[in-house]
Amino acid sequence: MNCAISGEVPEEPVVSTKSGLLFERRLIERHISEYGKCPVTGEPLAMDDIVTIKTGKVAKPKPLHTASIPGLLGMFQNEWDSLMLSNFALEQQLHTARQELSHALYQHDAACRVIARLKKERDEARALLAEVERQIPAAPQVMTANVAISNGKRGADGEELGPDGKRMRPGISAEIITELTDCNAALSQQRKKRQIPQTLASLDDLERFTQLSSHPLHKTSKPGIISMDILYSKDVIATGGADTTAVLFDRPSGQILSTLSGHSKKVTSVKFVGDTDLVLTASADKTVCVWRGSEDGNYDCRHTLKDHSAEVQAVTVHATNKYFVSASLDNTWCFYDLSSGLCLAQVSDGSEKMGYTAAAFHPDGLILGTGTSQSIVKIWDVKSQANVATFDGHSGSGPVSAVSFSENGYFLATAAGDGVRLWDLRKLKNFRSFDFTANSVEFDHSGSYLGIAGSDIRVYQTASVKAEWNLIKTLPDLSGTGKATCVKFGENAKYIAVGSMDRNLRIFGLPGDENADDASAASSDS
């Protein structure tokens, strides 16, 4: 008789008075202590229901297969087979363990190599940062005491001079860096929640754009519009001309509001400062002027900045509207405090033959993009004034004439003699090109459209890196009247303003939206 639990002959058999089943005592005692019921029937069971069965001591018979030589040989063969199978399993486990160990050692070696490379790059970056900090000296403390520094030199306008005879710059302070960083964080958060406005002009609208009006704004002796900007809150267009002036034009009324005269050579760049009454102009006469409007509509030059030694090609305003940057052919760009007109930092990359021809702030404000006379695009970290990326995708057929960041913060468009290049700032590579001569390139404020100015005006629909950027509209050819030098989208892309070398400001929009432009067109025809 066998135990109902183990199936073996019990050494100390007991029987249940309820079910009559036979059990090994130690097994049924453990089961009752844990569960309190019969393991077979499931009925409640206690030790009082268990009765011990008394048996005599008998010798267990030997197995039959051990009673003969062939049986013993068979038993040995079975043992040998079991040993071989066990040995084979152990060898497989050893092989697997060796592979895992080899892989772990390889990963450890690779990790050590990566750590060593990162340490090397970190040390190189620290050395580069230290070199940059040495090239940008801190503001001398003796300036507050109005005394000369150790070499006894002073600039013509009272500024301190360094040992090399160059002006000392205070540098971008930690407070300013904190302000720029906070602005960047706020704008980045807004961009994540930003949606394309419902009032944005649709693709069908842009396809129906036509020329609404044309306005001759600058003198005929030196014709040509070189730069342009739009103040969206008042719908005022500023143009910089080859006649050394900048003109503020009210688009709804078609009237010239003010003419800014103060430069001695062509105005290469003009920018509004947010929604304020401040206007910046840069000129080939090596100066930058800061203009402030008055109640009577006139503009006064509050600062004339003379920190560059060659033509100033571009100005761009930071998102805080407190600072701006100017870029010059003297191979430097300057970071200014707008309220005081003080140049806080003047940055050069050390190349003597590479002047800057274009500049634009990234929408978040911590990155500055510049174009050079050698067809190279350079990206700068404003906080450290370090060159963090260089794009050389243009073929070297002339200077980079314009740079424009998309509002989404991912794309950069650059224009040069060999066409327009689109760059992915996340991967630092050129992902699309438009191979025709371009003088200007501009994203609209929503980042939905891209305008390119050359012999004609081309408007593209923006897309992702892998998707196609479709050509929406080609506006009239300007090659017979003068090449287009600048293009800007109006608010919500409701119109497109184009400046050209024939001194005309052209407005393109939907037929029937001319409003006051009709009256101004009559004056332009005369």
Image (spheres, rainbow, N blue to C red):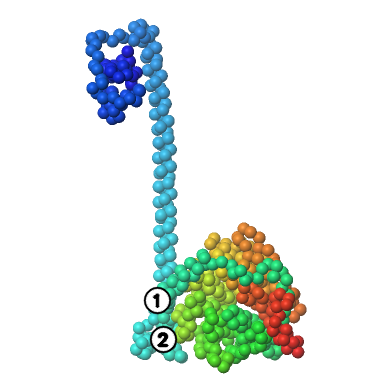
Instruction: Name which residue lies at 40% across and 66% down.
Output: 126
> Residue 52: x, y in percent?
24, 16
Q: Quadrant of residue 155?
A: bottom left
Residue kind at label 2, given as amino acid type: Glu
Left or right placement of residue 94 versus residue 285 in this view: left
Instruction: Name which residue lies at 39% across and 20% down.
Output: 82
The residue to which callout 1 is attached is 175
Q: Residues within 10 Å of mark 2 (few under 14, many from 20)?
A: many
The residue to which callout 2 is attached is 160
Left or right placement of residue 422 versus residue 33 in this view: right
Q: Quadrant of residue 90?
A: top left
Depth check: give the residue in front, 390 or 50. 50
Q: Quadrant of residue 97?
A: top left
Confirm whether residue 465 shows in the render.
yes
> Residue 371: x, y in percent?
57, 73
Instruction: Name which residue lies at 65% across and 66% down.
Output: 461
The quadrant of the image that shows the N terminus is top left
Confirm whether residue 12 shows in the render.
no
**Residue located farthest toward the bottom when viewing the structure as drawn:** 296
Marks 2 and 1, the one that precedes in the sequence: 2
**Residue located farthest toward the top when viewing the structure as drawn:** 68
> Residue 91: x, y in percent?
41, 29
Q: Nearer the viewer, mark 2 or mark 1?
A: 1
